[in-house]
Amino acid sequence: MNTVVLRSYTASELFCTKRFISTSSILLGPKSNDAKVARDKSKKKELRKLAMNKNIAKDPAYNQPLYMPLDMALRYLRAAEVGYPTSQQTISITTKIVRDKGTPNLRGKVFFPHSIESENSKSKIMVFTNNDQSQIDYYKNELGCDYVGGQDLVDAIQNDKINLDEIKLSFATPDIASSLNKLGKKLGPKGLLPSTKRGTVAENLTNIIKENSASYPFTQKRADAISFPVGRLTFSDLKLAQNINAVRDGLYKSLSEQQSRKPSIVGHTYITSTNSPAITIDFK
């Protein structure tokens, strides 16, 4: 009878010969399944969090721990700022935005009835036009534009005689618009190059300047909240309330224009001053 001898192999022999059996195909199955389970758990967790945030957003503001009517909230803000320099006392509101994954960011403009800029930090307006001197004087004296001119203004910008960082808005009349292309490298990156597409070129600039000079553009960042400065502590309660209403109008207008099957939801809104806690107020 023949005897079969079973030989044992060392580890080095197993790895160096064809007798080594790869287990990668065996391991790939469980790993792949584990990854799928992890993804499913993460997705379910995200959906639960979204549902919870939507429920919180729908909860009335008065159910929040630190809720106050606006008039009372402003009294507390003013009390919190006693002893601090007036120049540092800014009032802002922050609104929570709940959105589904893939929903685009909100963006739009708020038209404040009362300027939120202090006189010392007021941004400047520039107008390019070849109109006569009476029209130039009108833009300067009646509409408050800081720089108004034609080729002389173009030359001043080309020679770096104007600090463009101070300019907030730039407009032009059609008679000079085409000759501004040479300023593209200087004005373009700062968003100051007038164009018909952006609505900053028109024969009559009066209404455009009035509307845009009081505007505050906003864009929702990654965090699901948007903050707006609404005034200074020197503003009356009425002015602050009117500016807050303007924020609400601008925000809901942006929501109505949002291109999404599931538009974002406005959550709770908080008002703060520079040195105060956040107070929940009515906003919807």
Image (cartoon, rainbow, N blue to C red):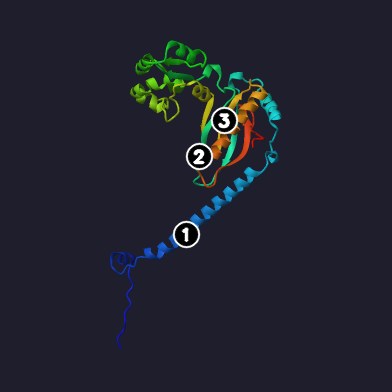
Specify the quadrant that holds the N terminus. Answer: bottom left
Compare marks 3 and 2 and give the one earlier in the sequence.
2
The image position of residue 61, as x and y in percent, is 67, 39
Tag 2 secondary structure:
loop
| Label number found at residue 105 | 2
Q: Please indicate whether residue 159 sits to the left or right of residue 70 in the image.
A: left
The 10 Å Cα crowd at callout 2, few under 14, some 14 to 19, many 20 or more, is some
Q: Vertical placement of 82 versus 265: above or below?
A: above
Compare marks 1 and 2 and give the one earlier in the sequence.
1
The 10 Å Cα crowd at callout 3, few under 14, some 14 to 19, many 20 or more, is some
Q: CA distance from mark 1 to mark 3?
A: 45 Å
The 10 Å Cα crowd at callout 1, few under 14, some 14 to 19, many 20 or more, is few
- Viewer-proximal residue, 120 or 144? 144
Tag 3 secondary structure:
strand
Q: Vertical placement of 132 versus 29: above or below?
A: above
Q: CA distance from mark 3 to mark 2?
A: 16 Å
The image position of residue 161, as x and y in percent, is 38, 15
Disc 3 residue type (three-letter): Phe
Q: Which residue is mark 1?
A: 34
Q: Vertical placement of 51 versus 23: above or below?
A: above
The image position of residue 86, as x and y in percent, is 61, 19
Q: Residue at x 58, y 21 (%)?
A: 88
Disc 2 residue type (three-letter): Asn
